[in-house]
Image (tube, rainbow, N blue to C red):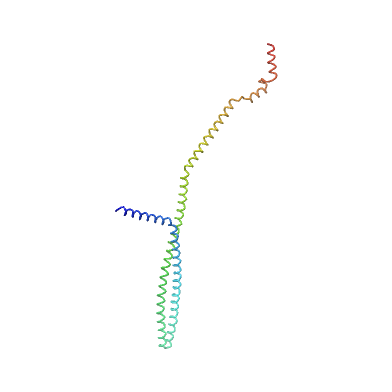
Amino acid sequence: MNVWSKLLTALRGGANEMGEAVVDSQALRILDQEIRDADTELRRSKEALAEIMAKHKLASDKVSKSAASIAEYEQYALKALEAGNETLAKEVAEKIANLEIEQASEREQAEGFAASVAQLRKAVTQAEGNIKRLKQQVDTVKATESVQKAQMAVAQRYGGSQAKLQTAVESLERIKQKQAERAAKMEASAELAATSAPDDSLEAKLREAGIKADSASADSVLARLKDKAKS
């Protein structure tokens, strides 16, 4: 195979792939249209079934009327025979024969309509079941398509924001670390202040009870001055 043949083969393959991609992208739309077409055909089939059922009813009514007419003329023929009028009885018999011929034709026609009705009923029932199942499958496919598109959108957004999310997490950890360090410093400062500060409350209680003299009182100053004067 020369280069040009390979190139043409590749082009045909690319065209087929492109055509399949277009068909796949429009698959749901094509299915919806096919279902609408099937519904239209089903409606026409039901209309045809109704027409044939009406014809079957009319043909059956004719058969019943023919049977009634035959029974009526048989009574006439019997009465003619009872009256001894064989000529009239034969004429009535000819009428009955014609009625029976018509009845046979009408019965055949009615039976044909009945067979058509049965076949069409079966076909319509099958078509209704197939269309119903197809609609259910299309609904499922549409729901799956929507879910998958949502999942793809989430995945794309998550993939694009993963770096930003990682940076935000790192920043949050740094803030938490600084807060922990600041809290530790504040706690240490409080401990140092507590250990270095004099116990003023205890000293005040001792002076108030007279157990310990106030070094800054007038009595203590005067006593110190008297001691110096004696010396």
Expressed as whole percent of the image width and height from the top left, the position of residue 37 reads 44, 63
Residue 10 vertical position relative to residue 173 in the rendered view, above or below: below
Q: In this view, does 53 lie to the left or right of 190?
A: left
The image shows residue 26 at horizontal and vertical percentages of 43, 57
Residue 129: x %, y % from top left:
43, 62
- Whether residue 206 is situated above or below residue 23 in the rendered picture: above
In this view, the residue in front, 52 or 41, is: 41
The image quadrant of residue 126 is: bottom left
Q: Which residue lies furthest to the front in this view?
A: 4
Percent x, y for residue 131? 44, 61
Instruction: Give the tally of numbered discs.
Output: 0
Seen from the viewer's position, the closer of residues 80 and 220 is 220
Quick one: which residue is furthest to the left in this view? 1
Q: In which quarter of the image is residue 213?
A: top right
Which quadrant of the rendered structure holds the C terminus? top right
Q: In this view, does 22 lie above or below 196?
A: below
Which residue occupies the foreground of this view, 147 or 205? 147
Task: Specify whether 175 is left or right of 88.
Answer: right
Quarter-of-image position of residue 202: top right
